[in-house]
Amino acid sequence: MSLIRKTAAELGALIAAREVSAVEVAQAHLDRIAEVDGRVNAFLHVDAEATLAQARQVDESLAGGESPGPLAGVPIAHKDVFTTADMPTTAGSKILEGWRPPYDATVTGRLRAAGLVILGKTNLDEFAMGSSTENSAYGPTHNPWDLSRIPGGSSGGSSAAVSAYEAPLSTGTDTGGSIRQPAAVTGIVGMKPTYGGSSRYGLIAFASSLDTPGPFARTVLDAALLHEAFSGHDPLDSTSVDAPVPPVVEAARQADVAGMRIGVVKEFAGEGYQPGVLARFHEAVDLLESLGAKVVEVSCPAFSYALPAYYLIAPSECSSNLARFDAMRYGLRVGDDGTRSAEEVMALTRAAGFGPEVKRRIMLGTYALSSGYYDAYYGQAQKVRTLIMRDFEAAFQQVDALVSPTTPTTAFPIGERADDPMAMYLADLCTIPTNLAGNAAISVPCGLADEDGLPVGLQVMAPVLADDRCYRVGAAVEKAFESRWGGPLLSRAPAL
Ligand code: GLN
């Protein structure tokens, strides 16, 4: 089998046993990027020489007898919202074009220390705001299953890179669904860890109380290995949880749901959902039952208000976070010809550097936070947030995990929702409650919709710091479906 088709776990084992070199593995992926990325546009930055130099270092330390971690020498692509000391970081925005961060994010730094080889930085919706990657200032990414469709967003470059076999692993961030929704629509695995379980240090902030780094991979075990490699307490992030990393790798290997109680969220499987998505979802629920889980229906009434609450809280936080792009400290500066005031340069730079969705959110958030409106909008949304947490608490008294479709539809055509923000926002209907409550959730492939032959994702939600349950259920589903399908779902994707 060619190297690009292997899992990260397999590649790590081959490299550790010195059956293949990290350089060969890196080269195979660089060749794949050169072959397909002109059509996919998953990457914003690739530097083949730098990648091969990192791989050479891993090979040298192996030759020197060092015993590496399970992912040493395995290539990875990082969402271009994590800082990297040796590469530009744009957040998909013109306002950061040409900026080179002086330091590594904790996520990128820890993975570098674990010997992962960086292939490059991936495309995203500007400042991670969007569900399609069409809001990138650097052009849309294309879904490898059908190049005329979106790969999800905002981490669409990361999902497309893994699904197109350009990288075995990638990182993403999930503020409202930006890992799970792109994973679902590209037929791969994507996990949002418990908030605070993965560090935000060096992650360009969108909505700080929601932003959560997480892994993309083609198998549940690979996602768990990556999750474990970058997670854990970080004193540089004030909201980092000082608790042991949940046993995610062990759970992915366990792949067993016998005796587990699983709740189907009643509010997330009715009107407005694509029939093929619902059909695959119900099949997955039947599968869980046949594997020995006890399945019950659970009602979470406040979930219906999650979307409006999120679209007050996330823009409010972003309006504050994005104030730092003031033409003075980073990247772009427009109109600084010696005749204009700092305020004028700031206004010109922000007008030229931010795209329309980012501007919409800054205005919305500024309005929601302004005096006189604060209680009615931001304050009210925070109350809804509490109700959503309570719904989760009540549900997790009854069940060990909750399931729903990851997203109401399969990948939509590029352009279809670009001018309709509400339609775009609905892509995150099922993923947002988990961000507001801070608990863990994964998306795993559960088949192809009959009407368009495109991948459908199953979302598994678990309590705070019970991330391992997502992997346990996800791996059981993966194992059972793969034996039914005769291999991974992705092997049914049309060849690129
Ligand atoms: N699509 C959602 C938004 O536009 C979520 C984004 C995210 O998770 N980064 O805000």
Image (cartoon, grey):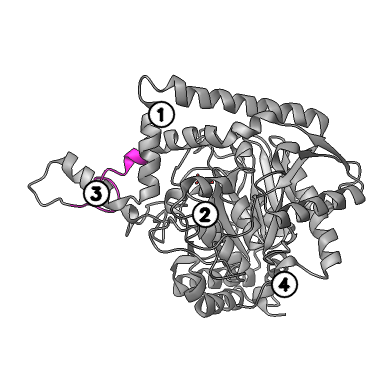
Which mark sits nearer the N-terminus, 2 or 1?
A: 2
Label 3 neighbourhood size at 10 Å, few (<14), some (14-19), many (20+)? many
Q: Viewer-nearest of labels 2 and 1?
A: 1
Q: Is residue 34 magenta?
A: no
Q: CA distance from mark 4 to mark 2?
A: 32 Å
The secondary structure type at the circle numbered 4 is helix
Q: CA distance from mark 1 to mark 3?
A: 24 Å
The secondary structure type at the circle numbered 2 is helix
Which mark sits nearer the N-terminus, 4 or 2?
A: 2
**Along the line of sight, which residue is nearer the eye, 310 or 476?**
310
Quarter of the rendering containing residue 448: bottom right
Q: Which residue is mark 3?
A: 349
- 70 with respect to 397 (left or right): left
Q: CA distance from mark 2 to mark 1?
A: 34 Å
**Along the line of sight, which residue is nearer the eye, 13 or 223?**
223
Counting from the top left corner in percent of width and height, residue 388 is at 64, 29
**Label at residue 108:** 2
Name of the residue lying farthest toward the left: 339
Q: Amino acid at mark 1?
A: Ala
The secondary structure type at the circle numbered 3 is helix
**Label at residue 368:** 1
* Vertical placement of residue 302 versus 294, above or below: above
